[in-house]
Image (cartoon, helix red, strand yellow):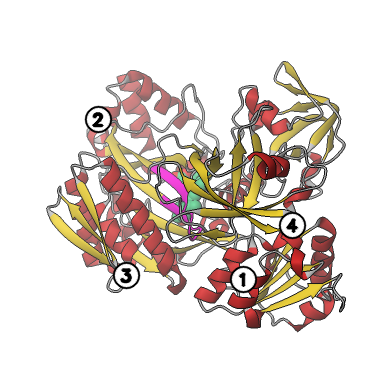
């Protein structure tokens, strides 16, 4: 279900990050949100609707949502549009708030590791921890203070829980994950958001230190989702053969062709759009399926085929 | 207009397990049927007699109970404006139930079991599933009309363990796949499914705890009584992810229809007959149909 909204205000947060406040077009309060939630934005453009996920950095008491968007260099789609053609009053649609990170209700201690724009999903989680008296800490890496999103706010609201690391300030610092992870008590839940290498390094460190998989939560860095080089391929469903152009997403092509595959995150992380592959080679790009599952399933929101792939139509309405 | 939710898909001619949950078009959690008053009385009587059987809640469920309570109350007021009105208050809201002629206050400071309180105004059983460390747990619920299971026993139990008694449910990792499906359920995108069985008698409050009382009815079905006495029991189950606490609200509405009534539609009688023929023995036993199945088959053959 989509919610009709319009942009209520736009603010320049740093050099390349804008913050947008969004309200319901009929002024109803937008749904309450779970800490860590994101929305999908459906922005109309000449080239069709641009669908992008963005973390909610805040839900105001009067039921508005806020998102922060970094202008990605070389961006042709999402962030470029948002920065250059969205102004106060722009109308668009959004999804209901969804969540991948999900704070652990009974976690003993919560530790957040953020790099750059990766801070965005954590703002509502930090707020939740504070408000409900939970034990938490934030480790936040950025290049310099001026580029550090929400620096002032974090310093003011979570002073004793936050540690900043600036890699290009006079005193150069980076997060020492090993050292940091080692200090947390048993029962700690770790949440990671940033570029892929950042996530990978911390996950590996945590695994090596014996953190159970269920206590490591992460969310892929959103602006990196658009792979630069993709190739066209074909997909066969029942007896029909449909081409997928290099700039098309398989999930969208399938749904435009009369299927109604449910989806959620569109970044290959939640598994909702999982389909069964009968034949052909798949270029998996998700971070959800296990190696074994990749032999028979794929997530069409991010993964693509090579040449021709065939989809098991019968499996579609099963899950 | 009320109609009995016939549980089989068009053309379905044999019994098999799958995740039969489908996206819900009207996005509702509850339904008011002509049996409302009768069932509310039974529900409340059952709660008064055996409260520990009908409601459980772990401590951390309080916020989610409130979210579910508001979610349901808002829906009642919106969909049944002649029957329910809801007025916001400083610390909660007031619900006017015009069918029961009641005015009930829901107050954050007073109601410690809001789910149990709102449950007294709807025919559904209300279960809350909490996600912890990648699994779903039944940490709160109101259950008055169960199909032979115990809330007290299942309290705090994981989805996979809850379904352990269901024969064949682990085959092809169906249980895991269904759990994964549930883990990915999103706010604003609810699903529904139905579950069916047959039962001897017309009892809604068939708790596992009282099995000795109602279970023996399975042996008292006769050739003469089968049509009126044996009922098709259908549970319409709805799954909503609540946006604020990310709890899953699982509502179960149980409907009963006698074989005789069902058989007024020969197509339906025929489909039930066909599916019963193909019902695997372990599932037939699990559903408790075995003791009187031959009577049912003979009856349906007579009708057809
Ligand atoms: C998330 C909420 C759910 C809860 C709390 C729940 C709970 C239960 C319980 C308590 C039973 C009875 C087990 C017993 O005999 O002790 C049961 C049976 C069953 N459940 Fe679920 N369930 C849920 C969701 C689902 C879903 C989503 C599916 C399938 C898509 C499913 C499929 C079944 C089936 C097939 C049975 C056997 C019923 C029969 O054959 O009569 N359940 N469930």
Res. B304 in view: no
Q: Which residue in the protein does label 2 denote?
A: B1
Q: Magenta stretch: give its range.
A: B236-250
Secondary structure beneath dot 3 equals loop
Mark in front: 2 vs 1: 1
Q: Do labels 4 and 2 share a chain?
A: no
Q: Give the farthest residue toward the left.
A: B101
Q: Do the residues labelled 2 and 3 touch (CB within 8 Å)?
A: no
Q: Which label sits on residue A300?
A: none
Q: Do labels 4 and 1 share a chain?
A: yes
Residue B246 covered by magenta stretch: yes
Q: Which chain carries label 3?
A: B
* Marks 4 and 2, how far apart at CA: 59 Å
| Residue A277 spot, x, y in % from top left | 76, 33
Q: Which residue in the protein does label 1 denote?
A: A153
* Marks 4 and 1, how far apart at CA: 17 Å
Q: Quadrant of residue A246?
A: top right
Secondary structure beneath dot 4 equals loop
Q: Are marks 2 and 1 in contact (CB under 8 Å)?
A: no
Q: Are marks 3 and 4 in contact (CB under 8 Å)?
A: no
Mark in front: 4 vs 1: 4
Mark in front: 3 vs 4: 4
Whichever of labels 2 and 3 marks the residue nearer the N terminus, that label is 2
* Marks 2 and 3, how far apart at CA: 36 Å
Q: Which residue in the protein does label 4 denote?
A: A15
Q: Which residue in the protein does label 3 denote?
A: B108
Secondary structure beneath dot 2 equals loop
Secondary structure mostly seen in the magenta stretch? strand
A118 displayed left or right of A229: left
From the viewer's side, name the closer residue of B39 and A138. A138
């Amino acid at each position: 279900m989509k919610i009709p909204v319009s942009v209520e205000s736009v603010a320049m947060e740093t050099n390349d990050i804008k913050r947008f406040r969004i309200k319901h077009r009929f002024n109803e309060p937008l749904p309450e949100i779970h800490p860590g939630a994101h929305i999908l934005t459906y922005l109309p453009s000449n080239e069709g609707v641009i669908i992008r996920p963005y973390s909610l950095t805040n839900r105001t008491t009067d039921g508005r949502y806020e998102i922060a968007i970094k202008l990605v260099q070389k961006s042709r789609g999402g962030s470029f549009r948002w920065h250059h053609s969205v102004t106060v009053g722009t109308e668009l649609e959004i999804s209901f708030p969804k969540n991948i990170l999900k704070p652990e209700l009974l976690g003993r201690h919560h530790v957040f590791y953020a790099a750059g724009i990766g801070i965005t999903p954590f703002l509502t989680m930090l707020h939740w921890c504070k408000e409900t008296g939970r034990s938490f800490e934030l480790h936040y890496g950025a290049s310099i203070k001026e580029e550090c999103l929400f620096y002032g706010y974090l310093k003011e609201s979570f002073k004793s829980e936050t540690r900043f690391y600036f890699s290009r300030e006079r005193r150069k610092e980076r997060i020492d994950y090993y050292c940091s992870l080692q200090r947390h008590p048993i029962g700690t839940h770790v949440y990671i958001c940033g570029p892929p290498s950042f996530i990978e390094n911390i996950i590996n460190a945590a695994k090596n230190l014996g953190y159970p998989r269920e206590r490591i939560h992460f969310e892929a860095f959103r602006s990196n989702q658009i792979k630069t080089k993709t190739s066209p391929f074909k997909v066969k469903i029942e007896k029909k053969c449909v081409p997928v152009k290099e700039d098309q997403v398989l999930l969208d092509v399938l749904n435009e062709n009369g299927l109604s595959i449910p989806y959620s995150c569109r970044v290959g992380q939640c598994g909702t759009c999982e389909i069964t592959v009968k034949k052909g080679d798949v270029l998996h790009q998700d971070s959800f399926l296990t190696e074994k599952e990749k032999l028979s399933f794929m997530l069409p929101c991010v993964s693509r085929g090579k040449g021709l792939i065939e989809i098991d139509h019968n499996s579609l309405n099963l899950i | 207009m009320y109609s009995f939710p016939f549980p089989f898909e068009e053309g379905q001619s044999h019994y098999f397990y799958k995740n039969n949950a489908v996206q819900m078009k009207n996005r509702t959690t509850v339904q008011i049927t002509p049996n409302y008053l009768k069932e509310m009385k039974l529900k409340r009587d059952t709660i008064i007699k055996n409260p520990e059987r009908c409601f459980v809640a772990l401590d951390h469920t309080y916020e989610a109970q409130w979210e579910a309570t508001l979610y349901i109350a808002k829906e009642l007021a919106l969909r049944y404006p002649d029957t329910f009105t809801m007025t916001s208050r400083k610390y909660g809201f007031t619900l006017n139930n015009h069918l029961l002629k009641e005015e009930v206050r829901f107050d954050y400071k007073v109601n410690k079991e809001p789910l149990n309180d709102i449950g007294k105004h709807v025919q559904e059983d209300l279960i809350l599933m909490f996600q912890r460390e990648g699994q779903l747990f039944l940490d709160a619920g109101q259950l008055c009309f169960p199909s032979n299971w115990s809330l007290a026993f299942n309290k705090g139990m994981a989805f996979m363990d809850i379904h352990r008694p269901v024969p064949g449910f682990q085959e092809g990792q169906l249980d895991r796949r269904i759990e994964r499906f549930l883990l990915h359920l999103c706010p604003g995108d609810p699903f529904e499914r139905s579950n069916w069985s047959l039962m001897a008698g017309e009892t809604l409050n068939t708790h596992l705890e009282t099995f000795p009382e109602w279970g023996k009815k399975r042996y008292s079905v006769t050739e003469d009584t089968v049509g009126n006495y044996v009922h098709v029991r259908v549970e319409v189950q709805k799954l909503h992810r609540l946006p604020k606490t990310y709890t899953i609200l699982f509502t179960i509405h149980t409907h009963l229809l006698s074989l005789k009534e069902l058989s007024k539609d020969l197509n339906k009688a025929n489909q039930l007959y066909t599916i019963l023929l193909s019902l695997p023995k372990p599932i037939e036993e699990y559903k408790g149909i075995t003791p009187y199945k031959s009577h049912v088959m003979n009856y349906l053959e007579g009708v057809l």
